[in-house]
Image (spheres, grey):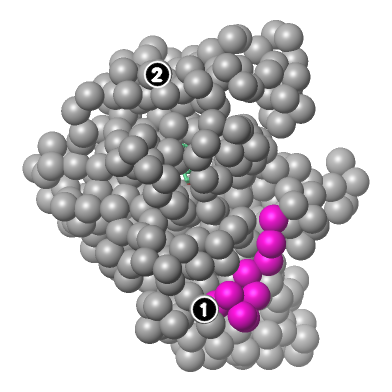
Amino acid sequence: MAKKEFSVTPYEVKGSVDYEKLIKEFGTELIDEKLLKRIKKHTGELHFMLRRKVFFSHRDMNWLLNEYEKGEKFYIYTGRGPSGKMHLGHLLPFLFTKWLQDKFKCKTIIQITDDEKYLFNNKKLEEYTKQGLENIKDIIAVGLNPRLTEIMIDTYNSKTLYNNAIHFAKRLTVSTVKSAFGFNDSFNIGQYFYTSFQAVPAILESVRKGKNVPCLIPLGVDQDPHFRLARDIYPKLGYYKPAIIHSRFLPPLQGTQGKMSSSIAESAIFTTDNKETVKKKVLKYAFSGGRKTLEEHRKYGGNPDIDVSYQYLYQLLEPDDKKIKEIYEEYKSGSLLSGELKLIMIEKANKFLEKHQKARDKAEKIIDKFLIKD
Ligand code: TYM
């Protein structure tokens, strides 16, 4: 692959993603200062992931806020495909969802797509469902409010999903799916149908209420293609297009190519990793933006923009702007060494995970409060 080439689909993220180019390719809009101001007017403060453009792009956020300002509350929808354990990257959209839920007091629907992972991978269906229940603990652990949050597992809620998905599927052609996801004739027909399932929660509140309710979907930008199709089809069925807010990817430990992915175990820090494992992984794999020798590093400084430890701190683990700026400057000037930066990140990651794992253990007892029945 040529140096600048990259590709982003829900099923593969390859290369070094150029987010500005991606905005053009996907036809989304950059989150600019004007929009941030508008959001801040309602939230009082901005989440650091917004301030730092970790959430960098959107579709129809201005429309959503227009509706909100007219008194039309929106709900949030996001999801997880339980292919395996969750990693730090997966937490990004859920942590942001929790913030949105708190600030806008909105209802939230989470979809767990065990069916999707079965259709696209090789384990038994029951194993994905079981993994889904494990992942739900991580999702609850971010602090979602049980009174405002509903979690649906596709195989548990198949009636609700199927009865709505058929209207969508009727309008979705094979050729559209092929061009959106790059599928060919050897893909199974469940894979072709699947987007119709992922699209349903984007209109579910409208179906339930018998009137259109705006929906906002926070997600990693790889999931956007599903909702591009949803935004084409739903107006034809009389529904609003869902608004979307996209995050960048937390990179894999090995560097800024692709994304942290649970299918490559050594690329990821999992939410259940213990302190020793985190330390070992980071020391062994985390790509460094440091110079070859200590002398050169002191003289020319490191490159935080490609340093994975710095990126994890920036995107997730160090919300304090003053501290992150100091780390940036010290690393760039050469006074902070790569090994030292790794140790800062390891400590932050382990603190973060200690808190998360405690909340995760507690979540086990309250899963039923979140699951919805068909
Ligand atoms: P899944 O399980 O692949 O990912 C769950 C969410 O995490 C995001 N994500 C990441 N974000 C930042 N850095 C990373 N390295 C990273 N890896 C994954 C994904 O973009 C996603 O937001 N089909 C979906 C499940 C789903 C869904 C949805 C997702 C169903 N309905 C609505 C978003 C919105 C899936 O397999 O996601």
The residue drawn where x is 48% and y is 86% is 321
Check the image and name the residue furthest to the left.
Answer: 365
Q: Please tell me whether residue 284 is drawn above or below residue 199 in the rendered image.
A: below
The amino acid pointed to by label 1 is Arg
**Residue closer to the observer: 6 or 45:** 45
Check disc 1 and report the residue beneath it: 38
Q: Is residue 282 magenta?
A: no
Q: Is residue 30 magenta?
A: yes
The residue drawn where x is 58% and y is 75% is 35
The residue drawn where x is 72% and y is 84% is 301
Q: Please tell me whether residue 74 is drawn above or below residue 31 in the rendered image.
A: above
Is residue 219 visible to the viewer in this orientation of the structure?
Answer: no
Magenta segment range? 28-36
User: Which type of secondary structure does the marked residue at label 2 adopt?
Assistant: helix
Percent position of residue 326, x then y: 54, 90
Check disc 2 and report the residue beneath it: 162
State which quarter of the image contains the C terminus.
Answer: top left
**Residue closer to the observer: 342 or 106:** 106
**Residue closer to the observer: 281 or 67:** 67
Q: Earlier in the sequence, mark 1 or mark 2?
A: 1
Q: Please tell me whether residue 337 is drawn above or below residue 212 in the rendered image.
A: below
What is the spatial separation of the Cα atoms under label 1 and label 2, in whole angstroms?
37 Å
> Which labelled disc corresponds to residue 21?
none
Percent position of residue 124, x then y: 39, 12
Decide: few, some or many residues near mark 1? Use Cα within 10 Å; few <14, some 14-19, many ≥20.
few
The residue drawn where x is 38% and y is 61% is 72
The amino acid pointed to by label 2 is Tyr
State which quarter of the image contains the N terminus.
Answer: top right
